[in-house]
Amino acid sequence: MNKVIFYLVMPWLVSGCAVEAGSSFDWPGMPGKKADSFHVSSPVLRPGIVDERLNRIDAVIIAEVEAGKIPGAVALVSRKGQRIYHKSFGFSDIEAEKLMRNDAIFRIASMTKAITTVGVMQLYEKGFFQLNDPISNYLTAFKNPQVLVTVDENDAVMKTRAASREIRIIDLLTHSSGLGYPFIPSPIQKTYIANGIIDGLTDQDEHLASQMAKLAELPLLFDPGSRYNYGLSTDVLGYLIEVVSGRPLNDYFLNEIFLPLEMHDTSFYLSEDKYDRLVTLYANDGGELISYTNDSDTDDSITDQVNTNYPISGAMTYFSGGAGLSSTASDYSHFIEMLLNNGELHGKRLLGRKSVELMRAPRMDMNGDGVVDFGLGFKVISDIGMVGELGTPGTYSWGGAFNTSFWIDPKEQILGVIMTQVRPNESDITDRFKTLVYQALE
């Protein structure tokens, strides 16, 4: 194959639209390969958007692909309930010269957390618990938590003390529970690894119940509620959903969130007919994109622990509420459109508007700078001047470890999703994509 086609498509948006040929470029790392660039123009009306400014997104993402910083991407924007931009770029698999498609399936990792948060809030609205209840009222293994005091030279736990109070459900929602992650350096990291605590993506024959029982036996990093620390809190919430609802997490998500929102390509594990749409996972290794294998020589702790065939192989028994889902940009846009609409989409209400209001209300300071900027499962902009980039106060967002991200802006009635699949990466395309959308507003 001497030539591959690089294209931008909006198949569900366009019908009988003009196709304009663009320029060719050398594909990084594939000497002699050329890729013709095409832009498919769309007649869709874009309320409050300057079209030629929005189309700047194309050139910026193409430049990242040309530079070899990302293999490809899918980007989507919706405003006032109307999808105004949905394009795919580059390759889902470079070696196979497999073009990216709008319906490509990505490992969304921590973008799973927002979905778990909604599941918790649904059960809260049904009266199963209050958010300030101790988690041990429902998961008894977490009763009487201990806090780490000292470790030895090998980071083995030497001394603990009783926590000042129990972990509350709202502490888990705001990552102020005192739990950490095995892949994030901390005084408890080696203890997690030694005890077989996993980050979320695994091909092992594991179940939430056994993992959460192990986690509950280990000390916390600090007293619950005292500060923010990103960790396994949302995995505990996933288990809370299982216990309270009496259903496996995958079944709960399917019936209470995915089917109502018509998210037919979102799941923990893929059916065989969707394997070919799963994008290949890459690492940026000294400026060169390399695909991961299970024995890749990388120093990235997350991907070192991931079976790179996840979510299409292995035991398929572990449902991580913090990291386990795969999805498409289109599917995920349905989910965040529901949040933008205060809990309802296309006549189906998943949450009450007051619950969404609470979720996007800032409660914790993420980085100790004195700005309260984390709500219930989301980073929240409380002061746009402190952020120093284009945006709107009240916008809430999150991302995933493999370079996927989203944001929701209630004031401007706009949302954005961008997905690529590189870790570690040298691209800030997820941030620049957001800037490019905002600069296009009238």
Image (spheres, rainbow, N blue to C red):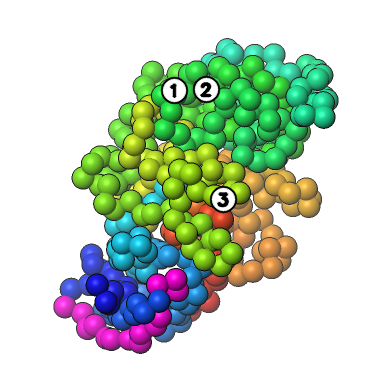
Provide the secondary structure element on which disc 3 rests. loop
Residue at (57%, 27%) from the top-left corner?
A: 197
Tell me: 400 left or right of 148.
Answer: left
Whether pointer 1 and pointer 2 mark residues with C-beta atoms closer than 8 Å, the reply is yes
Which residue is denoted by mark 1 in the rendering? Answer: 207
Decide if residue 276 is in sight here. Answer: yes
Q: Which of 26 and 322 is in front in this view?
A: 26
Return the x and y of residue 96 as percentages of the image width and height: 31, 62
> Which residue is located at x 50 percent, y 75 percent?
67
Dots 1 and 3: beta carbons under 8 Å? Answer: no
- State which quarter of the image contains the N terminus: bottom left
Give the residue drawn at x 29%, y 53%: 277
Q: Residues within 10 Å of mark 2 (few under 14, many from 20)?
A: some
Q: Nearer the viewer, residue 69 or 140?
A: 69
Q: Can residue 441 be seen by looking at this rendering? A: no
Q: How crowded is mark 3: few (under 14 residues within 10 Å), some or many (20 or more)?
A: few
Residue at x 71%, y 26% (from the top left corner) = 220
Q: What element carries label 2?
A: helix
Where residue 85 appears, as percent x and y from the top left, is 36, 69
The residue that label 2 is drawn on is 211
Q: Earlier in the sequence, mark 1 or mark 3?
A: 1
| Amino acid type, residue under disc 1 in the picture | His
Give the numbered dot on residue 298: 3
Within 10 angstroms of label 1, few (less than 14), some, or many (20 or more) residues? some
Mark earlier in primary sequence (2, 3): 2
* Direction left: furthest residue: 16
Residue 20 in magenta stretch: yes
* Image: magenta residue range: 16-30
Q: Nearer the viewer, residue 52 or 430?
A: 430
Viewed as shown, does residue 275 lie left or right of 217? left
